[in-house]
Amino acid sequence: MDKSICPRFEKAMGLLSQRWTGLIIYQLLSGPQRFCNIESSIGVSGRVLSERLKDLENEGIVKREVFPETPVRIEYSLTEKGIALEPLMQEMEKWSKNWLEA
Amino acid sequence: MDKSICPRFEKAMGLLSQRWTGLIIYQLLSGPQRFCNIESSIGVSGRVLSERLKDLENEGIVKREVFPETPVRIEYSLTEKGIALEPLMQEMEKWSKNWLEA
DNA sequence: TCAGTTAGTTACTTTATGTAAGTAAGTATA
DNA sequence: TATACTTACTTACATAAAGTAACTAACTGA
């Protein structure tokens, strides 16, 4: 009896409903950032952040760049595909402002 | 060094990034539905579906109605607060159509 | 009395996440 | 020379969340 859900939609939801993924993307919407900055901004553990960033890189949503300074600087940023999630994040902001208590 | 994220946004993201929550809401956007229908449509286990529906009811996103027919019929539907998530879901659909492979 | 229905719950297993310590590569300091 | 310091991870282990399958409650119908 299941009217089945579009598999692409399901995949998108699967990505965004992994813990921390949404906040990582939201955080990167404000510009390229380093590992330790993302970690402290959203409160995710290094173990999971490392895992998520790899997943997001594999999905083509996040880009990793190494700057061989001293100490080494590594920046994470959104690709075009990642930036395309901005309208979704804006809807989330709207909903939370309209329907959640401060 | 964290520029902190709006707590309401964080809460919204926390809700939607629990596994299955997004799909349950998406499924209910097509109209009121029974437990077993949601279960088979999205493939969630009864144990977790039960848990999520209780949470969503507590959050005021889902409404539970009992019809004392035989056998008993129980319908779950979205409240106004739940329906307000439709634009967000539409953005998710758009993104998945534009950026994910079929 | 026995089977059939829906809407769950329970006990148990597997997977995901958190925590804290450790590693690698490089520079600066004593 | 060696010790400490930095960032970006990784590893080992503990706890929490989710999956699986069997079970219960309440009711009807054969």
Image (cartoon, coloured by chain):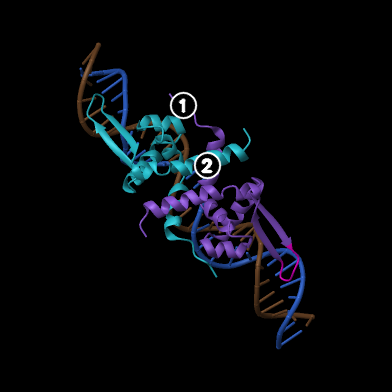
Chain colours: A purple, B cyan, C blue, D brown
Q: Is residue B52 left or right of residue D8?
A: left
Seen in the picture, residue A69 relative to A98 is either above or below; the reply is: below
The residue under label 1 is A3
What quarter of the picture does the C terminus of chain A occupy?
A: bottom left
User: Residue B22: x, y in percent?
Assistant: 45, 42
Q: Residues within 10 Å of mark 2 (few under 14, many from 20)?
A: many
Question: What is the quadrant of residue B27 in the picture?
Answer: top left
What quarter of the picture does the N terminus of chain A occupy?
A: top left
Mark number, residue A22: none
Q: State the predominant SS element of the stretch in magenta.
A: loop
Q: Is residue B75 left or right of residue A24?
A: left
Identify which amino acid the numbered label 1 is placed on: Lys
Mark number, residue B92: 2
What whole-number distance in Å separates the C-alpha atoms at marks 1 and 2? 19 Å
| In magenta stretch: residue B78 | no
Depth check, mark 1 against mark 2: the one in front is 2
User: Residue B2: x, y in percent?
Assistant: 53, 67
* Residue bounds of the magenta highlight: A67-72
In depth, the one of B75 and C15 nearer the eye is B75
User: Residue B102: x, y in percent?
Assistant: 62, 32
Q: Residues within 10 Å of mark 1 (few under 14, many from 20)?
A: few
Identify which amino acid the numbered label 2 is placed on: Met
Q: Chain of mark 1?
A: A
User: Which residue is at 62% across, 53% downward?
Assistant: A53
Helix, strand or loop under label 2:
helix
Whether residue B14 appears in this view of the structure is no
User: Which residue is at 63% across, 46% downward?
Assistant: A81
Q: Is residue B36 left or right of residue B6?
A: left
Helix, strand or loop under label 1:
loop
